[in-house]
Image: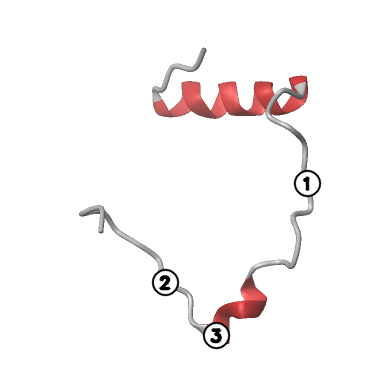
Amino acid sequence: MTSRTMVTLFERAADSIPPRPQFARPLTNPYVWNVVADAAREVGYTIH
């Protein structure tokens, strides 16, 4: 679909993803923003 590598999970893998996230905060949360900014910087992305 995107000409990039894709991961497909079948029903056997259903329990490999937790039913809900262990951490859920809005992107406007300062902690989350810092984590995203650090990750972006690490891979050479710029965010605004």
Three-letter amino acid code at the position of disc 3: Glu
The vertical placement of 16 against 10, above or below, is: above
Three-letter amino acid code at the position of disc 1: Phe
Q: Which residue is mark 1?
A: 23
Q: Earlier in the sequence, mark 1 or mark 3?
A: 3
Viewer-nearest of discs 1 and 3 = 3
- Where residue 23 sits in the image (x, y, percent)? 78, 46
Determine the residue positioned at 59% across, 28% down: 36
Three-letter amino acid code at the position of disc 2: Thr
Q: Is residue 13 left or right of residue 44?
A: right
Q: Which residue is mark 2?
A: 8
| Crowd tier of the residue under label 1, counting other residues whose Cα lies within 10 Å: few below 14, some 14–19, many 20 or above | few
Q: Earlier in the sequence, mark 1 or mark 2?
A: 2
Query: Which quadrant of the view contains residue 8?
Result: bottom left
Label 2 and label 3: CA atoms lie apart by 10 Å
Q: Residue furthest front?
A: 1
